[in-house]
Image (tube, rainbow, N blue to C red):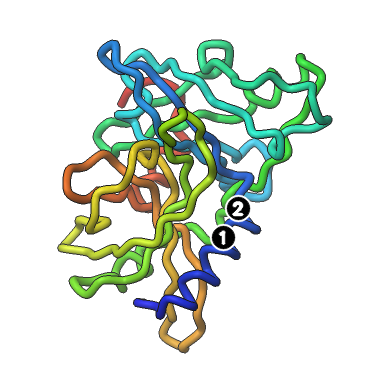
Amino acid sequence: MLLDPDAENDVAYELCQIVGRAILPYRSSVDDDQVHGTAFFFQGGDDPVGESLLTAADLVGSAGGGELSLRASVTEPAGVAPAAVSAAEVVPGWARFPGDGVAVLPTAGLHRYAGDGGWRWRVQPVPAGIAAGPEVVARLGADADSAFVLAHGVREDGSRPLEVAIERVVRDGDDVRITTELPPGYVGAPVFVVQADTTGEVSLYCLGLVLPGVGGHPVATFDRIRAVLPATPGDV
């Protein structure tokens, strides 16, 4: 669904309210280069055990290291949590699935790490109920739809504010793609769309996450993400 500019701005605002605290800045070292991206919390079901942190496999790298920066709004009580969490201190660590482009970190270790430090996570995971199913992906086509990417960009001064990029997404066969190249820091970020179903009811969906690209970005859609969520840490 291609929305008019006013409607796009309304959706962008609402997304920040309902899942803004799902999104975290991520930084890793790949081939000795500092790589900035975004990770987000996803709640796979009613059971807290189903919660995971998701990002792009290429961002994590084969070593599985990296660092999550913490905004004050995602932890409580105020002033107790560190400025960042090293992935090396969290067990279990990242599970990489390069064939699907996805990396998954079960959040049990993150919650234990917080508890040991005397603080708690205060996040808004993307809920399973809005994760796009195959029918949502199938409704995409060659005609562009409005897409919304929530990410932590990288400013010239090194700061990582939460941003919303309003973009266009298309589908060509099994490939779903954002049509323009996104700024640094956006790889791994969640992508949202608005669609009307066969009854005309309009709903918001999390389509998937941003993968690296040149001139545009492939999207790892949630049918691919769901396929790897039950797996255990390690490359597949």
Marking on residue 15 = 1
Q: For this rendering, which residue is in front, 14 or 123?
A: 14
Q: For this rendering, which residue is in front, 65 or 50?
A: 65
Marking on residue 112 = none
Residue 78 in the image: above or below residue 220: above
Query: Which residue appears at 16% of the width and 63% of the height?
Result: 172
User: Quick one: SS at disc 2?
Assistant: helix
In the picture, measured across the screen, residue 24 lies left or right of residue 73, that is left
Q: Quadrant of residue 231?
A: top left
Query: Which residue appears at 45% of the width and 32% of the height?
Result: 104
Residue 7 in the image: above or below residue 215: below
Q: Amino acid at mark 2?
A: Val
Q: Amino acid at mark 1?
A: Leu
Q: Which residue is mark 2?
A: 19
State the CA–CA distance, disc 2 to disc 1.
Answer: 6 Å
Q: Position of residue 212 (x, y in %)?
A: 26, 39
